[in-house]
């Protein structure tokens, strides 16, 4: 693919912006006035962390993630967006869980997805939206390590489960190549390049190749699809450690993708997060912690019937402020603002400008 003309990089890609951003985001945490740690503080931290997680019984929750995409990138560099392509993605996750024992729990998650978009597609501007249920996931968690003493709380949890294909994958039909037209110059070139299916030459999807820069688009069927049509194993680990009022949480999750609808196979996904922070408020019946949320997401190139799709790999690093509020051992509230400080993508894609996450869990 011909490289689109370069455009001015966004301000946060300056080499100096990362340390400046870290300092600014940590300021609310660093400016919290230190206080003597009393026994009641440790009890409150225990209630807000270990007791909430180990409490048996039913738990219900709701989580919302809002992402905004308005920037095109080609091989990690910002590219022109002459047709003002954009996408807003809102994912609402309905969560139901049951802790069978202090160390063992089950959780079911069903998302509702709404995506509003504007893109260049099939030679015209396509304004529309895609909404509906996403893929259902069922996870089991096991607290492999728990430790509590007079100064600290530690917990290490192993997670395993599966994602099931309950979301519509109709949009993946856009990725299926159309038969070659022997009278079309581009199709003749594709045939000479050896792009074939079942022994017969076929064209790659129009949206990916395009006859020239005017046809470039960063939004395709795999971006809009509500589901993958595949059954995917999920593995992960979560950790929590507190020392007096300091707190560090982290997680690693890996999704092993399998072949789904229309012969399309999404690439495996790795997500890792590390969130250092401090308890700004600790009381007998409630707590408030502030933290710096850092999230790394890495995904390779998707596959379609043995052919690798170039415009599907992305490595993203987000930083942003977050807060976690608890009331007793029943209620917890979370909010995080994710700002991308590193976005490295393959070929041409639309990439996120920011992401907001919020959620609550009620334990019965």
Image: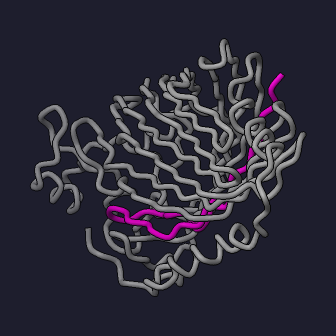
Q: Is residue 282 visible?
A: yes
Q: Is residue 128 visible?
A: no
Magenta segment: does it hold 349? yes
The front one of 46 and 179 is: 46
Q: Is residue 311 left or right of residue 126?
A: left
Residue 360 sits in quarter: top right
The front one of 256 and 247 is: 247
Residue 3's place in the image compared with 95, above or below, is below
What residue is drawn where x is 20% and y is 62%? 185
Q: Is residue 180 left or right of residue 114?
A: left
Residue 118's place in the image compared with 40, above or below, is below
The N terminus: image quadrant: bottom left
Q: Position of residue 229 (x, y in %)?
A: 46, 28
Q: Position of residue 298 (x, y in %)?
A: 39, 52
What residue is drawn where x is 87% and y is 47%? 283
Looking at the rendering, the stretch of residues picked out in magenta corresponds to 337-364
- Principal secondary structure, stretch drawn in magenta: strand
Q: Position of residue 53 (x, y in %)?
A: 69, 29
Figure label count: 0
The front one of 343 and 145 is: 145
Residue 47 sits in quarter: top right
The C terminus: image quadrant: top right
Q: Position of residue 35 (x, y in %)?
A: 79, 62
What residue is drawn where x is 43% and y is 30%? 235
Which residue extends farthest top?
A: 100
What residue is drawn where x is 58% and y is 54%? 275
């Amino acid at each position: 693919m011909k490289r689109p003309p370069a455009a001015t990089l966004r301000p946060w890609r300056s080499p100096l912006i990362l340390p400046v951003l870290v300092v600014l985001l940590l300021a609310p945490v660093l400016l919290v006035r230190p206080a003597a740690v009393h026994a009641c503080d440790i009890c409150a931290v225990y209630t807000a962390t270990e007791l909430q997680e180990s409490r048996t019984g039913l738990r219900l929750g709701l989580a919302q993630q809002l992402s905004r995409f308005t920037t095109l990138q080609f091989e990690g560099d910002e590219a022109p967006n002459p047709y003002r392509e954009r996408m807003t993605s809102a994912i609402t996750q309905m969560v139901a869980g049951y802790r069978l024992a202090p160390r063992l729990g089950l959780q079911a998650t069903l998302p509702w997805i709404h995506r509003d978009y504007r893109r260049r597609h099939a030679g015209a501007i396509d304004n529309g939206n895609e909404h509906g249920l996403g893929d259902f996931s069922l996870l089991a968690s096991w607290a492999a390590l728990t430790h509590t003493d007079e100064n600290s709380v530690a917990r290490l949890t192993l997670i395993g489960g599966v994602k099931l294909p309950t979301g519509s994958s109709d949009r993946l039909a856009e990725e299926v190549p159309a038969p070659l037209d022997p009278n079309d110059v581009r199709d003749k070139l594709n045939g000479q390049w050896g792009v074939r299916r079942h022994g017969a030459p076929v064209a790659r999807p129009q949206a990916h190749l395009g006859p020239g820069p005017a046809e470039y688009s960063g939004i395709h069927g795999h971006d809009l699809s509500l589901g993958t049509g595949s059954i995917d194993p999920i593995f992960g680990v979560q950790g929590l450690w507190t020392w007096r009022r300091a707190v560090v949480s982290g997680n690693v999750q890996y999704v092993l993708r399998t072949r789904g609808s229309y012969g399309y196979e999404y690439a495996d996904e790795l997500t890792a997060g590390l969130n250092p922070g401090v308890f700004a408020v600790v009381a007998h019946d409630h707590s408030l912690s502030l933290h710096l949320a850092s999230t790394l997401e890495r995904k390779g190139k998707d596959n379609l019937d043995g052919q690798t799709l170039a415009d599907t790999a992305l490595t993203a690093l987000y930083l942003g402020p977050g807060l976690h509020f608890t009331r007793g051992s029943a209620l917890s509230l979370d909010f995080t603002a994710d700002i991308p400080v590193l976005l490295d993508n393959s070929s041409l894609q639309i990439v996120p400008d920011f992401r907001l996450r919020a959620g609550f869990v009620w334990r019965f």
